[in-house]
Amino acid sequence: MSGFSETTAVTALGDGRYACNFSAAWSTLAGINGGILMATLVRAIEAEVGEGRGLRSLQCQFMRPPKAGDAEITIEVMRSGARATNLRLRIEQGGKTMLEGLAACFTPGLRELATWSRNAPAVEVPGDDPPVFTDPRRPSTADHVIYTPRIGPPPFSGTLPGPGEPARTGGWLELRDPQPVDVALLAFFSDAWWPAALGPLDIVAFNPTIDITFDVRTTLPPGGLPHQPLLLEALTRASLEGLCDEDAWVYAADGTLLAHSRQLAITMTPDDRPMVTHEDHSALE
């Protein structure tokens, strides 16, 4: 199995083009994990923009589910000013567009007129918890990530939220293969947990992402933060007409807000699309 750095690596081809390879070993029940796609985009963005400007916002529209194998990223610089660089992004595979996106990168040291942030939820730190995924239907990301639930009910438990309350889920995430916490890892973790919308369901389903916006909320030091478990909290405020929203916040172990994502997803069952099990990635090959 390839590690996180290897599976999100890109190779510059010139003229804003980057080669990449998606591995079925980093998939969910619906296919290649969307967070892995975003993390790979982050690698290409950082290579294209260079040092001095950091990614702050990445917006992605998922058009087709990519397959395991080679793909190509194209980056177009739309504007580069004194403080910001705006990019248009595309992932193509087999001559078809898989993803379209926009990104904004900023210089550090922007003026702060006020400072506040959402507090991290008060939950127990990871301990000697039992494995979360033991079913053959578990996503292959579970081979690479240690999940420690602390917020909300298990998926498919039929636990409805209280009147006027959002569905919630979350807990601690940590790579099994330690590496520094960088922006690419934050992008992956922002979409690596099971959706909050699955808790109220009592049947097996999954939520392929339609669009997602990933925002970096803290400037990371060069080389990233030391390896550590990160805390994710996700809320779904509405599931209507087959679509659900989700906001997710990712915090450092000390409670610092690192990233925030917002997405819209479609609810599907195995009858709608064949699921990919941990033991069989043939649907992605």
Image (spheres, rainbow, N blue to C red):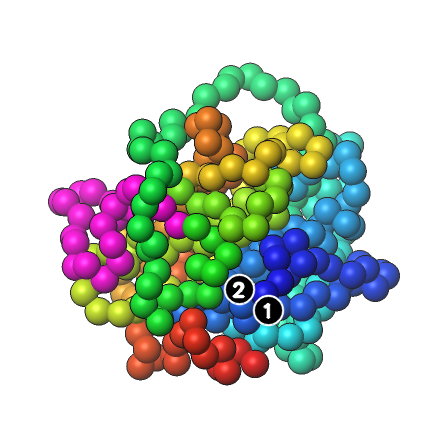
Identify the residue at horizontal 86%, vertical 61% (top origin). Answer: 14
Under circle 1, the secondary element is loop
Q: Residue furthest right?
A: 14
**Which numbered disc covers residue 249?**
none
* Direction front: furthest residue: 128
Location of residue 72 by image quarter: bottom right
The residue depicted at 47 percent of the width and 53 percent of the height is: 145
Looking at the image, residue 100 sits to the left or right of residue 194; the answer is right
Determine if the magenta segment contains residue 168: yes
- Name the residue nearer the viewer: 264 or 72: 72
Q: Could you classify mark 1 by the number of other residues whose Cα lies within 10 Å: few (under 14), some (14-19), or many (20 or more)?
A: many
**Residue bearing the label numbered 2:** 26
Residue 220 lies left or right of residue 133; in this view the side is right
Magenta-drawn segment: 147-169
Considering depth in this image, is 275 or 83 the residue closer to the camera?
275
Verify CB contact (< 8 Å) between mark 2 and mark 1: yes
Classify residue 19 by image quadrant. bottom right
Image disc number at residue 23: 1
